[in-house]
């Protein structure tokens, strides 16, 4: 661990994941809440999980104008990925967008690369581009843990389904480790 990263930031990130990942898994099992509530919770958790995994980056000693983007970019990347449902299914209805049997184009690795490149072009920061790509990838990999799966290699029609949750957790822990090394 680099000298600039306090252990508390790593523990805070790990603690956040300990709370958020089981909450994601519980919500994915289709709790008794209405579909609109589950959809809002799902999308919000998709934003919060990468923020927790990248905690050492945005808690590192730095001026606020450096830290805030490292908090907001991964949140928005994970959160806004589900906008592809609105585009693909041509509906603003959460019920319509959440009840489809397949996930659309934005749930593929090509979108991760394009979004990361877009953030890099706009910001000029490879660190921000990486946090955006990580935020979207965490969203995709979690969605791949259920029966609906994701079109990971879009436009190829093969759907990746039911990857074991521990692989998703390992991906997040790798993000936490990487964030610790970069901070």
Image (spheres, helix red, strand yellow):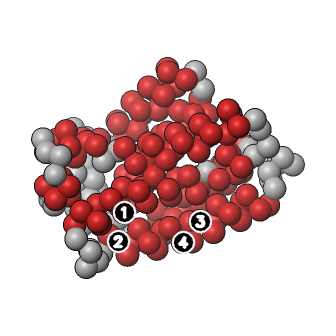
The residue tagged 2 is 27
Sequence-wise, the earlier of marks 2 and 4 is 4
Please provide percent x and percent y for residue 147: 24, 67
Give the image quarter of residue 95. bottom left
Are the two marked residues, 3 and 4, in contact with CB atoms closer than 8 angstroms?
yes
Is the residue 38 above or below the residue 5 in the image? below
Q: Residue at x 64, y 61 (%)?
A: 13
Label 1: which residue?
Answer: 41
Q: Residue 176 appears at what percent x and percent y?
A: 63, 55
| In the displayed structure image, the side of residue 68 where residue 163 appears, left or right | left
Q: Determine contact: label 1, label 2, CB under 8 Å.
A: yes
Nearest to the observer: residue 58 or residue 162: 58
Which of the numbered marks, if any, corresponds to residue 19? Answer: 4
Which sits in the foreground, 15 or 165? 15
Q: Residues within 10 Å of mark 3 (few under 14, many from 20)?
A: some
For numbered disc 2, what is the local secondary structure? helix
Q: Which residue is mark 3?
A: 16
Helix, strand or loop at label 3? It is helix
Pointer 3 or 2: first along the chain: 3
Task: Decide if residue 102 is in sight here.
Answer: no
Q: Position of residue 144 (x, y in %)?
A: 33, 59
């Amino acid at each position: 661990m680099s000298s600039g990263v306090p252990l508390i930031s790593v523990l805070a990130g790990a603690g956040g994941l300990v709370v958020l990942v089981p909450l994601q898994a519980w919500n994915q099992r289709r709790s008794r809440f209405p579909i609109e509530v589950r959809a809002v919770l799902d999308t919000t958790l998709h934003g919060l999980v990468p923020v927790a995994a990248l905690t050492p980056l945005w808690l590192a000693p730095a001026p606020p104008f450096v830290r805030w983007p490292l908090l907001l970019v991964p949140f928005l990347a994970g959160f806004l990925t589900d906008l592809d449902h609105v585009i693909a299914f041509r509906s603003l209805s959460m019920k319509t967008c959440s009840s489809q049997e397949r996930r659309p184009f934005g749930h593929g690795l090509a979108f991760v690369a394009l979004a990361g490149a877009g953030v890099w072009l706009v910001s000029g920061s490879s660190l921000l581009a990486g946090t955006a790509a990580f935020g979207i990838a965490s969203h995709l990999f979690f969605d791949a843990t259920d029966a609906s799966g994701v079109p990971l290699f879009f436009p190829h029609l093969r759907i990746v389904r039911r990857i074991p949750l521990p692989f998703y957790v390992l991906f997040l822990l790798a993000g936490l480790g990487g964030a610790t090394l970069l901070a």
